[in-house]
Each structure stands twice: as structure tokens, then as C-alpha cells.
Amino acid sequence: MQTFYQLFDETSSTFTYLLIDASTRDAILIDPVDHQLERDMAVLRDAGASLAWVVETHAHADHITSAGHVAMQTGAKTAAPSGCDIKPAQMQLIDGDTLTFGTQVLRAIHTPGHTAGSMSYLWEEATPDGPLRRIFTGDALLIDGCGRTDFQSGDAGTLYDSLTRKLFALPDDTLVFPAHDYKGRTSSTIAQERAHNSRVAGRTRDEFIEMMRNLNLPRPKLIDVAVPANQRLGLRDGESVPHGA
């Protein structure tokens, strides 16, 4: 049975990921989007999966998460990077923390720079041919790009260090799954991004900082609404994840 689902929200170009342990059907959901709640619940049901965790890579600025509502409907626990001020999350993740689902393990790798708390998550799924490595990079590493660093505690030098010292240190064949793509691409590899990423490859740290300083990107339209909502896991006033969920 299928153990991995990559789901896409066209409005915000956001990827949501469902990871399932083949033997127990316990699962983790990464970066869900509010208006895709019914879709995600249907995928869970159809996959015969029982959700153990809902996880955020960071407090997004371009959409609102459904993590709190997913947890309310499924009884899953919630986890988020400790540096993102997502207070309702039941587990505040730091570098090296792990989340278990069935026999599987997801490892948190702190990759700040897009935001101070940003996390990537490494899943080494055991297969008959050896471990299949997937890294879920949030907005830190994108396919042929990277997250912006001009707002929300971003720092270009810090992001360069996260990319070159942490993510690019992973094995070449590690599959890269970002939180967004705007050109119809779905995945890459660490080898591909290390060698050819147009923002990072061949640039010194100072050159990267200068390039990022001059991007002059428009301010995200939803940032003033999305960030505070995401720091509440998408829950409205008076709503809360049930104790012990």
C-alpha cells in the first residue's frame, strides 16, 4: 500500500505531505492548508491511515494552516519548531528531536534563515533496496531556489549556513520535497541542488547575502493575517486542541 502522498494547494502553491508507516498505517501530516481540510481527511480515510502527528515546518506567511483542526478531528498530536512561537503545538521541536509514527522516525533538523525557527524533517524509510531518504525542507530549500529572508526574522547569512552546512551535507540521493513550488516541479535531490541551485551554487556567503538583499520581492498579501493565525495552529478564539490529543 502507498506510504507517501504529496498533495498540492494551487491557491498558495503549497505542498502538504502525508507519511505513512507501511506496517501499522500510523502517519504524519506536514504543512496542511486550511481550505484543504476535507481533501486531507478523505486521503487519510482512503489510505487507511491513523494520524499520529501534525507538523509545521514554520509559521507560514502565505496561507493558514489547518493543523489545529486536523488534530481536533483525528486526535493527532501537534508539533512545531520551538523558535516559531506556535504556542498551542504540543511538542516544541528543537534540532535533533524525533517524532515516531509506527516503526518510522521523522528527525527535525533546524534550518533557520527564512525564519529563525524553520525546521526541515528527514525521513529515512526502510525499503528492500535500502533506506529511501526524503527531506522536507519547508521554505528553506526550494527546487532551484530558496526561501526569502527579508521579513519574519529572516537572515540571509543564516540561511546560507543552513543550506550549505546542514542540507547539502546530506547524502546525494536524498530526495528534496519543499513546502512550495511555483513552476510545476515536485521534487529534486540534494546532489542536484548542491550543484545547480541558481541562488546558492557557486556563490560565497557574502555573494548570497548581497543577492538576497536585492531581490525586492513584493510583501506577501496574507502575511498580517496568516502569521498570527498560524501561530495559533489555525485555531480561532475559543478553539483549542483537546487535552491529551
Image (cartoon, rainbow, N blue to C red):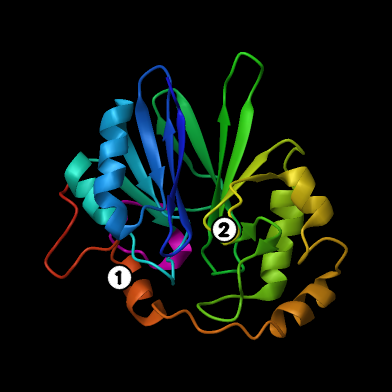
Quick one: label 1, few (<14), some, or many (20+) residues within 10 Å? Answer: many
Note whether 143 is above or below 159 in the view shown. above
Q: Give the range drawn in magenta.
A: 82-92
Q: Position of residue 149 (x, y in %)?
A: 61, 75
Q: Which residue lies furthest to the top in this view?
A: 128
Note whether 35 is above or below 1 in the view shown. below
- Residue type beneath disc 2: Asp
The label shown at residue 181 is 2
The label shown at residue 194 is none
Q: Position of residue 2 (x, y in %)?
A: 44, 25
Image position of 15 (left or right of 65): right
Point out the image quarter for the N terminus.
Answer: top left
The image quadrant of residue 240 is bottom left
The residue carrying mark 1 is 229
- Residue type beneath disc 1: Ala
Answer whether residue 87 is magenta in the image.
Answer: yes
Rendered residue at 68%/69% (across/down): 158
Answer whether residue 67 is magenta in the image.
Answer: no
Q: Position of residue 207 (x, y in %)?
A: 83, 76
Closer to the camera, 31 or 99? 31
Rendered residue at 63%/58% (across/down): 142
Quick one: label 2, few (<14), some, or many (20+) residues within 10 Å? Answer: many
Closer to the camera, 197 or 171? 197
Is residue 187 visible to us here?
A: yes
